[in-house]
Image (spheres, rainbow, N blue to C red):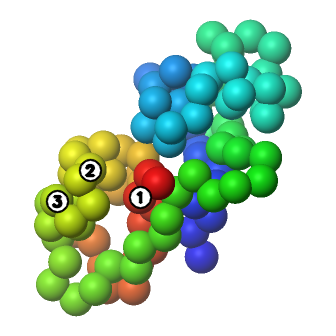
Amino acid sequence: MTDCNTYQVQQGDTLSQIGEWFHVSWPDLARINNIQDANRIYPGQVLRLASSQNVCNAYTVQYGDTLSQIGERFGVDWRQLAHYNHIANPDRILSGQTICIPG
């Protein structure tokens, strides 16, 4: 099951980019995750995105869905959906797969 209230940092991510995507300020991300230096996050690090509320909605991929169609349906760029859901090949999503859509 996908946890849409955590995010695993990828190469090149910054707190401000992650915050922008998930609609959480980077100072809040730093506070929630006890990060002293906002410039020191690393790939593989798992960040909590909020203390209590959900910042994303889980979507279960249906047969025939494409990332582009899902992005269009929710008003989100498919490239960002691929990046923030760690989808290496955006042409290959599977029925039953859960992806996170920012709220």
Residue 48 drawn at (x, y percent) = 71, 45
Residue 45 drawn at (x, y percent) = 67, 37
The residue nearer to you, when weighing 84 against 28, is 28
Could you say which disc has been placed on residue 72 in the image?
A: 3
Identify which amino acid the numbered label 1 is placed on: Ile
Q: Identify the secondary structure beneath mark 3.
A: helix
Q: Identify the secondary structure beneath mark 1.
A: strand
Identify which amino acid the numbered label 3 is placed on: Glu
Near mark 2 (Cα within 10 A), the count class, few <14, some 14-19 or many ≥20, is: some
**Above or below, comparing residue 32 to residue 46 in the picture:** above
Quarter assignment of residue 28: top right
At x 44%, y 52%, the residue is 102
For label 1, the residue is: 101
Q: Identify the secondary structure beneath mark 2.
A: loop
For label 2, the residue is: 76
Q: Is residue 96 visible?
A: yes
**Between marks 1 and 3, how big is the CA–CA gap?**
11 Å
At x 41%, y 73%, the residue is 59
Tell me which label, 1 or 2, sits earlier in the chain. 2
Residue 74 drawn at (x, y percent) = 27, 60
Q: Report the number of numbered marks.
A: 3
Residue 101 drawn at (x, y percent) = 41, 58
**Between marks 1 and 2, how big is the CA–CA gap?**
8 Å
Identify which amino acid the numbered label 2 is placed on: Val
**Above or below, comparing residue 88 to residue 57 in the picture:** above
At x 47%, y 54%, the residue is 103
